[in-house]
Amino acid sequence: MEIMTVCTGNICRSPLAEVLLATRLADLTPAVHSAGVRGLPAATMTPEAVDLAVHFGVPEDVADAHRSRYLTEGMLSSPDLILAMTRDHRRAIAELAPARLRSTFTVREFARLAAAVSDEELLAAADVVGADAGDRIRAAAAVVAAHRGIVPPPADPADDDVIDPYRREWEIYQLSAQQLVPALAEVERVIRLVTP
């Protein structure tokens, strides 16, 4: 199974999402990557993002090893699930790889929609495609995507975004994590549900 997380510079939100998912799903041996729509070349995570990663259980050496990458079209063909941090990032992904729309969400959008889908529906879709974990995640993502327009949108569209903490105070980093971490927990729940 392969998961891609995407933000702007690939030094705060998407690498935090990447290392959290990789750590929390380690027993399933996923390939988790991240990139930025305006990714900096080989930059480290910000110290604040590293602190948050460690606080949420990521080994410090794992967080320290991150190097940012610029998102390219080629990176978007293989992930089974693509999680953007904002609607603008999701739009940029859709422009690069329109065929991947059913596998692409903002992370908070995925959590909001997935919470409205029954486990039975997710499992039924996954069971149709067989035992391959990646195929099962794609099938579940397609079911979640099908609920766009059925599940009411948030009153404030920004509630599907994770706020950008870059060059801002620690409280904004904490707020960003408060938006991101529960959404990642729902991603993990769905992946574990459908992964054999």
Image: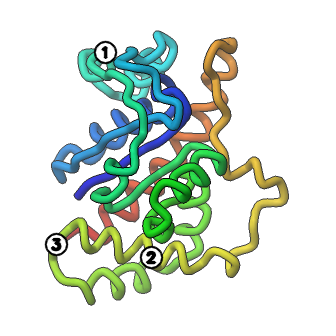
The tag on residue 80 is none
The tag on residue 132 is 3
**Distance from label 2 to label 3 (Cα)?**
16 Å
Q: Earlier in the sequence, mark 3 or mark 1?
A: 1
Q: Nearer the viewer, residue 147 or 53?
A: 147
The residue type indicated by label 2 comes to: Ala
Displayed quadrant of residue 174? top right
Residue 53 lies left or right of residue 178; in this view the side is left
- The crowding category of the residue bearing disc 3, from other C-alpha atoms within 10 Å (few below 14, some 14 to 19, many at least 20), is few
Residue 53 lies left or right of residue 149; in this view the side is left
Q: x%, y% of residue 166?
A: 61, 19
Task: For the N terminus, give its image quadrant.
Answer: bottom left
Task: Identify the residue shown where x is 60% and y is 58%.
Answer: 109
Residue at the limit of the structure toward the right, as seen here = 155
Residue 170 lies left or right of residue 44; in this view the side is right
The residue indicated by pointer 2 is 142
Q: x%, y% of residue 84?
A: 52, 48
Which element type, helix, strand or loop, lies under badge 2?
Answer: helix
